[in-house]
Image: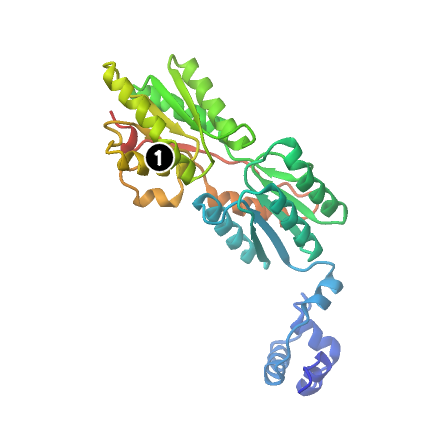
Amino acid sequence: MARARLQDVADRAGVSLATASRVLNGSARQPGAELVERVRAAAAELGYVVNAQAQALARSRTGLLGLVVQDISDPYFSSIAAGAQAAAREHGRMVLLASTERDPAAERDAVAAFAAHRVDAIVVAGTRWSAPEDAPVADELAAFQASGGRAVVVGQPLGTATVIRPPNVAGAAALAAALLEQGHRRFVVLGSPERVVTAQERAGAFAGAVASGGGEVVEVVEQQFSRDGGYAAGDRVAEIARAARSAGEDPPCVFAVSDVMAIGLVARLRDLELQVPQDVPVAGFDDIPTLRDHVPGVTTVSIPLEEMGRLAVAAAVAEEGAEVSAAVGHDVVLRESTAR
């Protein structure tokens, strides 16, 4: 059977082609309720399917937003994606998702693919890498913007895209001040290699605030910016803690630059029969939803992850020249993992 055409729907409903088009293609100029119902009933009877490509050509937009995240299995990114999805629904848009497994080349390919599919806007969420690694994705976004698309990044600046910037520096400094207030004086920073900009921002701000407050960072341990990276760091952290105990000192408090790293670290310390916070105090950053069920409760910096996704979509769909808030706050949440 041939696919039903819009003209077939108009004939069945007894209306003009223009009226059928206004009803089914979402025009702001809708006919009366009775005509709307007749057209929709006719479309249902005939099995008519709206041609999204034709709509896109007519409106010069597709109603689609591309969202690129670095690891959808990470609660940090899934929370941002949830906020973006909710905001997109409110604006009558659909979100297409790509997860890049923290591979800059895959990130570039995802942006290029979304641009080729004529999405209206692209949101890229995640830490930035080294300048050479970031250049290809920045070029893809620039080309997309030049063709009329809107680009937004959640993280550090990338080209001329609108930026929703997490409070990495302010949050890490506030956490250091709170831990010093708790009585911690010696710290280990669990960070990631220099190419991971988010980790460097948080680690640098934390160390600076510790020094300003009279504390000391005794060691920086670098691992992958992931749960497995935190787990891998556990052996070295255990060595440091045991050496401190042998010297008659309190073990240093560990600041992991993300909650998922903190969770991995705690898991490894448990395997090594070390308790948190009795043997090793641990703090993280992000306040991911997973922490609600974690024992012990992990001290962290709470940032509004879902709200960041919502802000990114608001920026992506805003009218040209409209003011869009990109301000992101933070709160230090002290929990059992750093109790003294």
Amino acid tagged 1: Leu
- Which residue, as the protein is rendered here, is positioned at the far top? 214
Task: Tell which of 114 and 23 is nearer to you.
Answer: 114
Q: Is residue 17 above or below residue 331?
A: below
Residue lying at 23% horizontally and 28% vertically, measured from the top left = 278
Task: Tell which of 69 and 174 is nearer to you.
Answer: 69
Residue lying at 70% horizontally and 84% vertically, measured from the top left = 8
Task: Tell which of 225 and 45 is nearer to you.
Answer: 225
Q: Position of residue 33 (x, y in %)?
A: 60, 76
How many numbered tags mark residues here?
A: 1
Side (left or right) of 208 relative to 325: left
Q: Is residue 158 visible?
A: no
Q: Quadrant of the N terminus?
A: bottom right
Q: Is residue 87 visible?
A: yes
Q: Position of residue 226 (x, y in %)?
A: 44, 39
Q: Quarter-wise, where is residue 181 in the image? A: top left
Q: Position of residue 101 (x, y in %)?
A: 53, 46
Q: Quarter-wise, where is residue 120 in the image? A: bottom right
Side (left or right) of 69 relative to 316: left
Provide the residue designation for mark 1: 265
Binning the other alpha carbons within 10 Å of mark 1 as few (below 14), some (14 to 19) or many (20 upward) gives many
* Element marked by disc 1: helix
